[in-house]
Structure formats: C-alpha cells, structure tokens
Amino acid sequence: MIKYITLLCLILFSCTRKSTRPNLVFILTDEQRYDTSIHYGNDKIITPNLNQLGYESVVFEKAYVTQPVCSPNRSAIMTGLFPHQTGVTMNKIPLDERIKTFPELVGDDTYQTSYIGKWHLGKEIDPSHGFKQKISIEDRYHHQEDATAKVKGIRYSDYHQWLIELGYQPDVIRKKTFSREFCSALPYEHTKSSFVEKKALDFLDENRNNPFILYLGFLEPHTPVNGPFNNLHNIDDVLLDETYATYVPEKEPLRNKIIRINETHRNIKTSENNEMGILREEMKKYWGLVHQVDLSVGKIMSKLKSLGLDKNTIVVFTSEHGRMMGKFGITPKRFMYDASARIPLIIKAPGYKAKKVSYPVSQIDIVPTLLKLFGKTVPTSLPGKSLFDFESSDVFIEWNTDFTADGNPTNGKKYSNCPTVEKDCNKAMLQNIRTVVTHNGLKLSISAQDFDLSELYDLKNDPKEKNNLFYQPKYQDTIAILKQRIIEWQKRVNDNATL
C-alpha cells in the first residue's frame, strides 16, 4: 500500500510540476509603429484584440528597438544581444549558429519549439537555433544549396507551396515565385497572416499537453501597404500632424535628405495638400494591415483560452521596428525618430497584473525578462535586465551603416540623386549613429564619425521631434553628459564605433 501511495504522489507531483511550467507565444510583426492601438493613443484604428490583450497585460508605452531595421533588430529580439554583438549589423547577414537564441538559452529539450513566419536571420526554411519546427512564408531568401539536407536548387517556402495547392500560379516568372505585391492582393483567407495564424492554431492543438515555445513572425503591416482591409477605416479618422508631407525640419542630417530624395517614390511633384492626401490614404491602408494582424491575435488568444492554456502561457506582442510613413517627407524606417524606432510592446504573464509603464524601455530586455519568467538564470553576457523588475534606465539604440567605404550600398539600394557633392553624400551614408533616450525624455543621436549633423530632442516638450536642440549653446552641457553615457554604454557592450 505504501508503494502505491508513493507512486500516486510521484504522479501527482509530476502533473503539478508540468502544469506550472510556462509556455510562450511570441507575436512579432513587421514595420508596426507604436501608435497602432488604443493603448498608444490611437482610438480610431480598429484593433479590438490588441486592445483587449493590453487590458490584461503590462503595456510598455515607450518601447524602443535596438536598431531600426529588420535583421539587426530581429537578432537582438531573439538573442538579447545588441546587433554589433550578434554581428548582424545589416540585412542579409545570417545569425551565427554559435549565438544562442531564447529557446537555446532555456536549454530544455522537452519543450516543443516552433518558428512560423518571417525569420530573416539566415536559414529561412530549415529549423535552426533551437527551433525544432520552421514553417516559412518568404520566397525572397533562397537557399541554392543546403549542405545538411543535400538539396540543390531553389527551394520554396511553405506558404508558396500552400498557394500552389490552392491553384495560384507564381507571378515572378524568372524565379517562379510569388511577389509580396501579389500576395497582398489575395483574399484575406489566403494572405500570409492567415497562413501564419492557421499554422499557429494547428501547433497549439497538437501541443496542448506539451510545454511549448511558439514564435510567430507576421510580415504585416510591412510594405507593400495593401491588403483586404484597405477600405475598413474612415479616411476622416486618419489625421496626420504638420510634420508630415512636405515638412522639413531645420538642422536636418544630410543622410535624411538623401533618403527622402531617393525613396519618396512619387512620379511627379505634388502640392502639400495633395501629398498629405496621399499619405493619409497610405496610412488608412496601413491601419487595415494592422487590423489584419489583430484578427489573428484574437483567434490565437481564443484558442489558448479554449484549450485551457491561457493561465500558464506568456504572450508577447511587439514589432521589429516602425516606419516613417511620410513624417518629415520620409517613407521608410532606418531612423531614430519615434515613428521608426518606437514600437508596441505588450507582455501578458501569469502572476502579473495589468499595468502601464510610462518610462522608456528597450527590446534588449525581452530575452532576460523571458528567462526570468521561465525560472532561468540570465547569463552575464547579456546586457539587458528583466522588464518586470520595473526599474527605469537609459535606452540605447544603434545604427550601423549598410554602405561600404567606396560609397556603394551593400543593401542593394542605389542613390542616384545627391543634394550636394557626391563625396559628402557618400560620407553621410557611411555614418554610424548612437542614440540614448533618457527617463526624462531627452533623446541624443550622435553621428559617430562626426561628419553629418547630430540631433537632440526633448520628447516631453517636443514629442513631434520638430526642434533639433543639438546646436543651441544652452544645451551643450546636457549633450556632454548624455554623450558620456553613450560612451560608458559602449564600453560595457564592447561597441567600437568612435564618437
């Protein structure tokens, strides 16, 4: 009898222990600015599921990326290391297999791990970096040969193969692939977001009795700004302030001018009113893409609840960076302005009540936060800390140039129009930038090679970032103090960019 009682106790202990192990659903969108839900001041955009998630979570109102571009910041989100530490300082650089991602840092092989969606860190199709399953959506990143799988020739994403099964034919004839433009024009049920959602729900059903780590890499609301909900929102609700369209701030870095001139994508010059109208229409479509992801968030949260997993699953919602969307007349990301570098960050964690955090935080702290929530020790090699310590500190952002010394771009972008002499444009595009955001709202961005103009903004009194204070004499002492903070951070994280 004693033996049976002991066995029963062991079984009960095992079940109890299993039930207390956390799961993770990490939802990562692409090019989603911070101002895209009610929790970030937008009560016009239709995001009921993100709104509800925020009401149940810790909402970090002023969250910043580590570098405002795709692969570098993804590497930081996945590893807890800054881009200069991972070596992924620009797009098209794979993440070194020796650098551990969150699942590898957890180090528990009993977890079922899956990455569904855009990866953008090297092996787009094959499982890697601690993920036992990889379900891909992108055909832009081909593998001509995989030495492990012994497969030669072009290989296509899981989403590509699904579209073929549905009867679609590739629109890119030479590569026999589906372009992003083609996919954005499909019915909602056949979009990339729906595919990611479908595979996520399947994974949750299959692993309802297993501990799991699930990452979802949505492409939306990334360009092309087009989708099935283009006309969902009322254009009258889309209000852009005076810093959009043709507004150009004083004391603007040359790099900004170059990108504005070469990436505006307007065939003809338009008046300020016409330009504002174009940008409002673009923003309306952008909101539609955010809504598209919101639908998937709702279905994933409902599935967790229906399976009884909602009480023991950490849910993270964030984006890899924002997008300027016409602020200062600039379209893309790659800037330290809040429109580009500030993103939503919402974390729902068992045992933590909903609250809003108003001081600036960094995505570099996501991995340490998750490790502590999983009951793991945070390696001393990681520069971040747990966000759930609720202690404010300076936020650091970096820009690592994607141009070479001879002025040629390594990212494929070729700038034919230069507003000044060509050698000055080349120098401007070579600038590395280092930024600090303080708890009291000061943002200093230093042009590391001291060729282009630097910037200082008082976000508390100038949230639109209209007034560059860097060259005003009364701020020189403040600039010296903030610059020293950046230098001290550089020493801590072995950043060799010269200031």
Image (cartoon, rainbow, N blue to C red):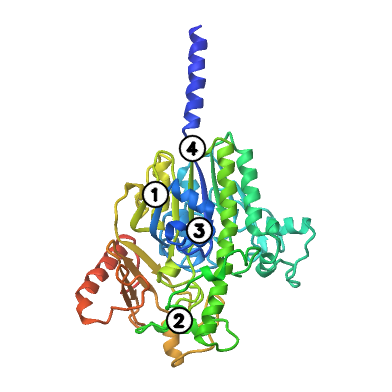
Q: Is residue 133 above or below residue 125?
A: above
Q: Label 1 to label 4, Cα distance in Å?
A: 19 Å
Q: Amino acid at mark 1?
A: Pro
Instruction: Locate residue 399: give its quadrant.
Output: bottom left
Q: Which of the marked residues, 1 or 4, is nearer the chain's N terminus?
A: 4
Looking at the rendered structure, the secondary structure element under dot 3 is: loop
Q: Residues within 10 Å of mark 3 (few under 14, many from 20)?
A: some
Q: Nearer the viewer, residue 98 or 338?
A: 338
Q: Which of the marked residues, 4 or 3, is nearer the chain's N terminus?
A: 3
Between tags 2 and 4, which lies in front? 4
Q: Which of the marked residues, 1 or 2, is nearer the chain's N terminus?
A: 1
Q: Amino acid at mark 4?
A: Asn
Q: Label 3 to label 2, Cα distance in Å?
A: 24 Å
Q: x, y percentage for residue 127?
A: 60, 51
Is the Cβ of the residue at disc 3 closer than 8 Å to that at disc 1? no
Q: Which of the marked residues, 2 or 4, is nearer the chain's N terminus?
A: 4
Which residue in the protein does label 1 denote?
A: 368
Q: x, y percentage for residue 483?
A: 26, 71
Which residue in the protein does label 3 denote?
A: 96
Looking at the rendered structure, the secondary structure element under dot 4 is: helix
Q: Nearer the viewer, residue 332 or 83?
A: 332
> Going 54% across and 79% down the picture, which residue do you hit?
277
Q: Is residue 107 above or below residue 19?
A: below
Q: Residues within 10 Å of mark 4 (few under 14, many from 20)?
A: some
Q: Residues within 10 Å of mark 2 (few under 14, many from 20)?
A: few
Which residue in the protein does label 4 denote?
A: 312
> Going 60% across and 38% down the picture, which residue do you hit?
207
Looking at the rendered structure, the secondary structure element under dot 1 is: helix
Which residue in the protein does label 2 denote?
A: 405
Q: Amino acid at mark 2?
A: Ala
Q: Which of the marked residues, 3 or 2, is nearer the chain's N terminus?
A: 3
